[in-house]
Amino acid sequence: GGADSSIIATFISEMVRRGMHELGAPLFCQKLSLPLETDRQKIVGQILTCVYQGTQNSSEHTYQAAASLAQSIGATFHH
């Protein structure tokens, strides 16, 4: 559920941060076949889409937590 998805999203954001640090933005983007971008959040938004699939047991807090995480790392978010 939410914990698993949250950690994967965080891992992807961290992968982008470390990749840009180690390789520089141009080479990192090239290796991922992405257009050149120097903003980490914009790169995350190009490679990560988060989809919220609430159930009858989900609360508004759960939705807000998912949306907040996606926004904070730059991921595209759908609900």
Image (spheres, rainbow, N blue to C red):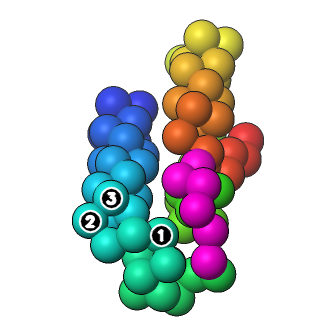
Most foreground residue, 1 or 48: 48
Q: Is residue 35 above or below residue 4?
A: below
Spatial separation of the CA atoms under disc 1 and disc 2: 9 Å
Which residue lies at the image location 67% right of the left edge and 13% below the top edge? Answer: 60
Secondary structure mostly seen in the magenta stretch: loop
Q: Which residue is mark 1?
A: 25
Instruction: Tell me if residue 8 is in the magenta stretch.
Output: no
Query: Does residue 77 appear anywhere in the picture?
Result: yes
Residue displayed at 64% across by 19% down: 64
- Does any portion of residue 1 appear in the rendered image? no
- Label 1: element kind: helix
Q: Image check: 30 left or right of 51?
A: left
Residue bearing mark 2: 22
Residue type pointed to by label 2: Glu
Q: Say which amino acid is labelled 1.
A: Ala
Residue at disc 3, secondary structure: helix
Indicate whether 53 appears above or below 57. below
Residue type pointed to by label 3: His
Using the image as rendered, state which of residue 78 and residue 31 is in the foreground. 31
Q: Position of residue 39 (x, y in %)?
A: 60, 55
Mark 3 lies on residue: 21
Dot 2 and dot 3 residues touching (CB under 8 Å): yes
| Residue interval drawn in magenta | 36-41
In this rendering, the answer to whether 64 lies above or below 50 is above
